């Protein structure tokens, strides 16, 4: 068992902060902290400054809620993108994952999560109303529901579909080549790319009720 004291308050503080990161326990945090101690000081300073600058200067796009250093993100600002198609994703990581496939040329809409009553996440906690507003105001032709094929993802898909049912927009979803229960970010690029290419109308998998 790692002792609670490392004979240095500064090292103890560094380990405590590093261990707050997801997937980082105190053993790993100690190993990282000692690694930084062995490196040149300028390397540790550069790491610290990059994290501080990221936290201070990265915000969220007012249009799609993706990360952005400006009011509107580079994807939304790119005139070469298909502004009539919006791909709805759970989080920023999913934008990065889908972009890596190079199969989506439209825009995005980041919900900030999925509906999960057990975790206290309701539709009001997500960017669903702003999605509906975009459909109403931006003359969108297609909304692609690209949420992970989990119970929570499917629940959110169906909720969004019902919200958009009376609007003149085509609602599609990723082809079910994705394994049920898998998170989108862990899906290989080829499978995800094919799922985007072969997307289907939402009604073919979830009939209107």
Image (cartoon, rainbow, N blue to C red):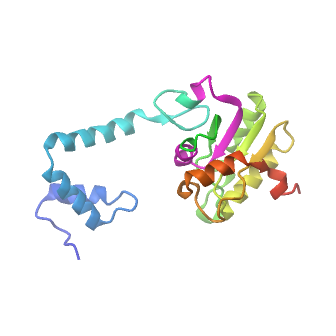
Q: Residue furthest left?
A: 7
Which residue lies at the image location 19% right of the left edge and 72% below the top edge? 3
Residue 151 % position (x, y): 68, 64
Q: Is residue 182 left or right of residue 25?
A: right
Per the rendered image, the range of residues in magenta is 76-98
Name which quarter of the figure residue 107 lies in. Answer: top right
Camera-nearest residue between 186 and 93: 186
Q: Is residue 209 left or right of residue 63?
A: right
User: Where is 122 relative to 111, above or below?
Assistant: below
Q: Is residue 177 magenta?
A: no
Camera-nearest residue between 148 and 116: 148
Q: Is residue 62 left or right of residue 54?
A: right
Which residue lies at the image location 37% right of the left edge and 57% below the top edge? 21
Looking at the rendering, in which quadrant would you find the N terminus?
bottom left
Residue 146 seen by the camera? no
Q: Residue furthest right?
A: 209
Residue 61 % position (x, y): 55, 33
Residue 194 % position (x, y): 66, 50
Q: Residue furthest top?
A: 79
Which residue lies at the image location 66% right of the left edge and 56% below the top edge? 115
Q: Is residue 44 left or right of residue 88?
A: left
Which residue lies at the image location 31% right of the left edge and 60% below the top edge? 19
Q: Is residue 95 magenta?
A: yes
Camera-nearest residue between 188 and 163: 188
User: Where is 202 relative to 80, above or below?
Assistant: below
Residue 209 % position (x, y): 89, 57
Count of residue discs? 0
Residue 70 seen by the camera? yes
Name which quarter of the figure residue 165 lies in. Answer: top right
């Amino acid at each position: 068992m790692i002792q609670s004291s490392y004979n240095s308050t500064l090292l103890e503080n560094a380990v405590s902060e590093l261990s707050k990161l997801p997937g980082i326990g105190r053993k790993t945090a100690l190993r990282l902290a000692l690694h930084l101690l062995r490196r040149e000081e300028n390397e540790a300073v550069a790491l610290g400054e990059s994290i501080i600058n990221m936290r201070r200067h990265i915000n969220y796009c007012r249009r799609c809620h993706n990360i952005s250093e400006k009011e509107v993100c580079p994807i939304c600002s790119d005139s070469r993108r298909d502004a009539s198609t919006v791909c709805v994703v759970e989080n920023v990581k999913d934008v990065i994952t889908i972009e890596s496939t190079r199969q989506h040329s439209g825009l995005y809409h980041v919900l900030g999560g999925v509906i999960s009553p057990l975790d206290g996440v309701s539709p009001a906690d997500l960017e669903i109303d702003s999605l509906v507003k975009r459909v109403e105001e931006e003359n969108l032709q297609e909304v692609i529901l690209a949420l992970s094929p989990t119970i929570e993802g499917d629940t959110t898909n169906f909720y969004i579909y019902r919200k958009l049912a009376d609007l003149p927009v085509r609602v599609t979803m990723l082809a079910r080549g994705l394994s049920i229960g898998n998170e989108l970010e862990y899906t290989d690029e080829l499978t995800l790319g094919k799922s985007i290419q072969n997307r289907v109308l939402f009604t073919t998998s979830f009939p209107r009720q």
